[in-house]
Structures are given as structure tokens and as C-alpha cells.
Amino acid sequence: MRFGCMGALVTCAVLLVGCTEDAKPVFQPEPAPAGVVTEYDEALEPSAAVLSLVPADATSLVVTDFEQLRLVLGLGTLESETTPQERARFWRMLPRTAALSQGLLRSVDQRLRQRFGFGQDDVTWEASYSGPVSGWVLAFDDEVPMRAVQRAVGAGVGPLSGAAVDTERRLVTSTTPPPIDDSWGVLPEVAALVGNEAASTYVERGCVDFGTVFGAGTKDRLASAPAAALRSLDPLEAFAVSFGGELATVQLGEDRADAFDRLRLADVMPPTDPEFGLAMGRGVADPSTGRLGYTIGDPAAAVELTLARKLPFAICED
């Protein structure tokens, strides 16, 4: 089991210069990312551990770490003696966070508990990928009897129907995982962006079309200043957005001469819906590491913008 320190008070003390309204995110030293992830390692953060299970043809990845989300909400880790009321409290509080998933098994949780003795609470983290191929991954807690999970899969309960169960690694995947050589694990441009402690992480290979972010036809109506800002951008091979309790960190890759230009795009371009600056604001940039940092003003709006890919900093160069 992994442990972190992402409660709101701890986050504020460690990652912010003070806890005032004027506080801005600051970057902390991070370990050098691995070049590739050649096998599944449960000791890695979920955003890195899952890479070897994601097919190379996928173009985006969403990872939600429920253990970290419990810490963000100040609820601690689940134990066998955790009461049903305490478990329910977590799900009531979850919308207050920037969780990118509400739980794949939530819709069949009661059925799973009654018939098989496990449920959504027993999923430590989950991931979903999309693009030309789509699928998902569930990682289960150490105390879950995987034979019960196998029976639920065999019974075709909800999304578990037709899934593949790896009892040794305590994983359930929507389909048989790809060979390592045909997975995201061997893509260094992706591996370099993930692996940091986060409650939720979104990763995309490539940039986002201007029209997706700001609306179809908007680009043709840009004034001279925003048009010039668009021309100043460098190509973007991939990016990641990681959410904690109060902060969001964007990874663009090292040595981004356009880091400040991308940071300012939300200010000079037409507004998104919801408005990006209200969801994620007070941005800072570090060109050498290619990181942007924001405070999360509206978690629900931040989630909506991310899943809809309305992220100004990620638009394609002109």
C-alpha cells in the first residue's frame, strides 16, 4: 500500500508560500522520471505503474487514485473496521475534489458487495484510456480476495463482464494487456511526464486542436495579439495534468521555451466554458522543466475542462 501527504493542510504547508489568498503554487524538486516503464510495478505511482497496461494506439489516459483522494479529504486510509457510514462519507465528499472518475464500479457496488463481498471501496486506483482503442484498469487492495473478483467477472456483473483478471498483480483490465513493446510503457515522451504523487492525472499524446478548446471558427476571428501568441508556440508532443488537493501541475516536457507563452494563452484567447481562469488560476511556469502550476479554484470546473480537453495551454501551434 502506498502512503502520501496530500491533505489540504499538508499541501498548503509544503507546496504554497503561506496560505493566504495571494499564495501562488511553487515547484518542489522532483526525482528524475524513468525513461521507460518496461513492466508493471505496484510500488510506482499509478500514473506510471499503468503505462505498461495501456496500448500504444491509445491517445489519452485518465488515472484516479482513490487512496490519495481519501488523504486529500482528510479521511485516512480504509481499514477493515471502517464503518459503512465512514465509507459513504467519502463518496459524498468526492465531488469537492478534482477527481477525474467517480468510480467505475459505483453503479454495481451494492450488487458486488451482496454477492461477492467487495466493491468500489476496494479499488485503490483506476485508469481509463481512449483513442483508436479504449479500455480500463482497476487495481485492488491487498485484502480483497481475488477469487471473489474472478467470480464477479465470470458472472458478468456490470463493467466487469468480459474483463481479464490478474490475481498475482491484483489487477482487472477490460481486455488482455498489450505486449510491453506495444504499450505506453516504452514511450519515453510519456514516461517523462508521469509518476508524481497525485489524486488524479490526465495524459494526452499530442496537442489539442484550437477549435476543441475555444470553439469552431474562433481561430479565424482572432485579433492580432492572440494570433501572434498562437504563432509563438512550439510543437507539443504530449502533456499531463496532475491534480492534488489545492494545486494542479501541468507537465509539457523539459526545455519548453514557450512555457510562459502557453501559460498566458488563457488570458489572451477567447474565454472557455467554464472559464479556465476560475477553474485553475494564479499560474506559474518553469521553462527548464516544462512545468506549469495552478491553484485549483473550482475543482468541478477543472475536471469538466480537463475531460472535455478545453485546456488553453495544450493547444496546437499555428
Image: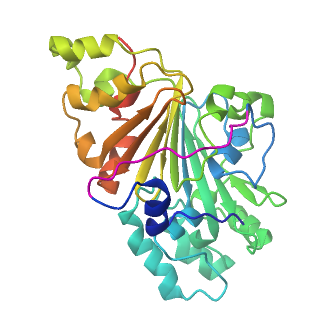
Question: In the rendered view, does 104 fall on the left or right side of 220?
Answer: right
Q: Where residue 299 sits in the image (x, y, percent)?
A: 34, 55
Q: Where residue 80 sits in the image (x, y, percent)?
A: 67, 85
Question: In the rendered view, does 263 fall on the left or right side of 108?
Answer: left
Q: Which residue corresponds to the image point at 19% horizontal and 15% vertical from the top-left?
A: 225
Question: Which residue is the extreme one toward the right?
Answer: 168
Q: Where residue 314 sits in the image (x, y, percent)?
A: 40, 28
Question: In the rendered view, does 213 fall on the left or right side of 83?
Answer: left
Q: Is residue 245 visible?
A: yes
Q: Is residue 288 above or below residue 296?
A: above
Which SS does the magenta portion mostly show? loop
Q: Which residue corresponds to the image point at 36% horizontal and 65% vertical from the top-left?
A: 96
Task: Give residue 215's quadrant in the image.
Answer: top left
Question: Does residue 28 belong to the magenta stretch?
Answer: yes
Q: Where residue 280 sits in the image (x, y, percent)?
A: 32, 46
Question: In the rendered view, does 70 fall on the left or right side of 145?
Answer: left
Q: Which residue corresponds to the image point at 35% horizontal and 22% vertical from the top-left?
A: 261
Task: Give residue 246's quadrant in the image.
Answer: bottom left
How many numbered marks are there?
0
Q: Is residue 307 visible?
A: no
Q: In what quadrant of the picture does the C terminus appear?
A: top left
Task: Give residue 308's quadrant in the image.
Answer: top left
Looking at the picture, tell me which residue is in the foreground, 106 or 75: 75
Q: Is residue 80 above or below residue 269?
A: below
Q: In what quadrant of the picture does the N terminus appear?
A: bottom right
Question: Does residue 27 belong to the magenta stretch?
Answer: yes
Q: Is residue 217 above or below residue 199?
A: above
Q: Which residues are magenta?
A: 21-34
